[in-house]
Image: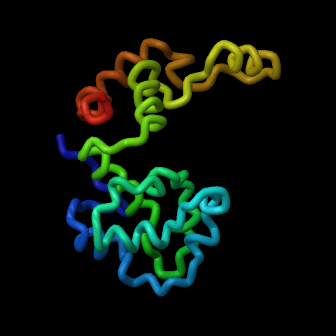
Amino acid sequence: MKKPEFENSVKTSNHKELAESSKILSCFQCGTCTGTCPSGRYTSLNVRRIVKDSVKKDISDELELWMCTTCYNCQERCPRGIKVTDAILHLRSEAVKKGKILPAHRKVCGFLIETGHAIPIDDAHSAIREKIGLAVPETVHKYPEALREVKKILKSTGFDELVKE
């Protein structure tokens, strides 16, 4: 079965090809990406630097690579149409293939494999939802039989092997 290709996705493991496919080299350093980054306001994340550095060197060990919330603010506002968030997601994917993933992210991946949710709804939050009249979300919480299918998909893609310690 052929995997779907998405228009905005960045498809390469080569730094030069990444630069070309994401248009990184057309950046004229306006700072829009960094200025609109919600993570950058509170952390050392500078998306412009991370993406530019990725053209020159392997940044798999850079903590900042994992600080991006993938909100797409930078990508949506870039006057050059640079696929900043897509490039960061690609760089993370390449880091995971090398076994480099932050412990917190690995834990979230474990939740996903175990429960079908990156952040499962616990009993306390279920009670709050019920108290304020929120229905059970249209997820495996509502359809627990779907968890088997989620686990099957994650296993078939090799996700479980990528994120195990």
Residue 108: image x %, image y %? 47, 32
In which quadrant of the rendered view does residue 41 lie?
bottom right
Q: Which residue: 58% across, 70% down?
A: 34
Tell me: residue 51, above or below residue 106: below
Most extreme residue toward the bottom is 28
In which quadrant of the rendered view does residue 105 lie?
top left
- Residue 158 horizontal side relative to residue 23, left or right: left
Residue 87: image x %, image y %? 38, 63
Q: How many marks?
A: 0
Q: Which residue: 29% across, 76% down?
A: 20
Residue 135: image x %, image y %? 69, 21
Q: Which residue: 53% across, 81% down?
A: 79
- Residue 97 horizontal side relative to residue 116, left or right: left
Most extreme residue toward the left is 1
- Residue 75 horizontal side relative to residue 147, left or right: right
Where the N terminus falls, by quadrant?
top left
For the rendered model, the colour scheme is rainbow
Where the C terminus falls, by quadrant?
top left
Q: Which residue: 43% across, 12% down?
A: 145
In which quadrant of the rendered view does residue 148 lie?
top left
Task: Using the image as rendered, state which of residue 56 and residue 71 is in the foreground.
Answer: 56
Tell me: residue 72, above or below residue 155: below
